[in-house]
Image (cartoon, helix red, strand yellow):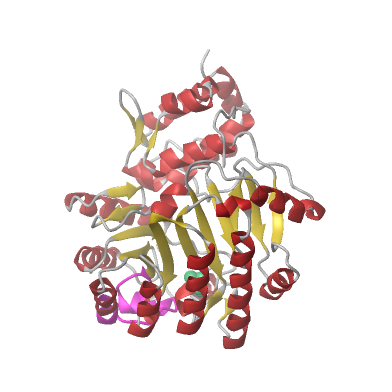
Amino acid sequence: MTGNRLNAMLAGMSSAEYQLLVGTQEGDPLCRAFTEKRGMHGGFTGSEIKPAQWQAAWNGLMAEEAQPGKRVAYIHIPFCRRRCLYCGFFQNYSDAELERAYIECLVRELQMAADTRYLSGAKLNAVFIGGGTPSSLSSLNAAKLLKALRAYLPLTNDYELTLEARINDLIPEKMEIWLAHGVNRVSIGVQSFNTRVRRAVGRIDATEAILNKLQLLSAYGQAAVIVDLMYGLPYQTMAVWLKDLQFLTRAAIDGWDLYQLNVYETSALKAAIAAGRLPAAATVAGQAEMFAAAEAILADHCFPRISVCHWSKSNRERNMYNTLTKSSLAVLPFGAGGGGRIGGVSLSLERKVERYMNMIRQGDKPIAAMRQPHSGYSLQKAVMGQIKQGYIDLGSLAGCHGSGIWELEPLLKIWERRGLLQTGARVAKLTVAGQFWYMNIARSILECLNALDIHKSATKVE
Ligand code: SF4
């Protein structure tokens, strides 16, 4: 009877709903598997905790002893010196006085967590300092933050401490502070090595400067050097993209992520293209071809694949934080705009810097939203984790989360016929087309699990 409920659900859909969820049969799957690219929303979310209960709920969670296992922390720096045209996450321009006051509050927030039973009895495997632009912090403020982090957050011996950076900030004075205070992974938003492409979207340095600065950081021998590249930017033709990939293979780096450009409706990039100041970004089909070209070239070089969009070039790259956050373990959040979860309870922190600082000064955790655990949460993370690794293993999901997951088998068969999956004896692997559309596949699966109420959870979340 497997799939009866799923088939009935699909049969009851309008053609537009069906195409969004299952995809389309027209054309080649790489460029046209779905009618549109989808982001990751609409997973399982638990019920909201009322604001009056936030502080007590947080204090209660931190007063409990941590479960054995791994855990990580995320620290948010909400400042950038320049605003990139494509950005959908910009919060505040850097300001020396605001930055000083913010770091003071962030240090206090770390200190408040250090005094809890949860953190005094558990070590963190990875910490990620993201933003914004963490590398934009002055050397003095970066040193204050990193010293506090090492003093208040207990780390495992083999910890990973990542700092997000812009090329422009890779100067000896800053890098030496980061490395001296325990940063062992630097993730750099290069986006493209092509000077014209970069400058069109608000990035500063030219090709040679990028390569030199990556070399400089790498030469310290103390941190994994990771690069983010985007595909589909204005002026980034296929020829430019192929050159970008060549630079990746030559540069002094340990790994990289490849991201497709999203042109957000409210972004300055959208406005610049609409006004004719910049040429159009690549279409979805164009991006798909760029992704497939990258996949083929990087496979030819035999670079190890860490996920569908992340490769390593040396064993210095472990990608611990990103890998661990794909499971349901605890992510402790700090800083204005940070987000995380503990004990399955998810929380996001106040984004407005002034309000964040006022809450810290009152001795409160600066919470802006909090939700109870959802019974499907660990299943959701398991599904997402597999898809991000490029496969779907219904057998192992059923083993941990209940046999109801087999109801999805007919959907996987459809995707196999359409060239998005290749089903072997044990698991279904995402083809190159499936990897390009992995977010659509993940979202469709989660929507089916939700609609059919298949989320029996057998795994404890920390
Ligand atoms: S550095 Fe990052 S957060 Fe800041 S504007 Fe650019 S893309 Fe946005």
Q: Is residue 273 visible?
A: no
Residue at left offset 33%, top offset 83%: 172
Name the one closer to the observer, 47 or 243. 47
Name the one closer to the observer, 57 or 403. 57
Q: Position of residue 189 (x, y in %)?
A: 39, 69
Q: Position of residue 182 (x, y in %)?
A: 39, 68
Q: Hey, which quadrant is residue 195 in on the image?
A: bottom left
Look at the picture and state if 442 lies above or below 236: above
Q: Is residue 213 left or right of residue 67?
A: left
Residue at left offset 57%, top offset 31%: 449
Q: Position of residue 308 (x, y in %)?
A: 36, 47
Q: Which residues fall within the magenta stretch?
A: 190-211
Q: Is residue 434 visible?
A: yes
Look at the picture and state if 247 lies above or below 158: below
Q: Position of residue 141 (x, y in %)?
A: 51, 80
Name the one closer to the observer, 351 or 15. 351
Residue 207 on the magenta segment: yes
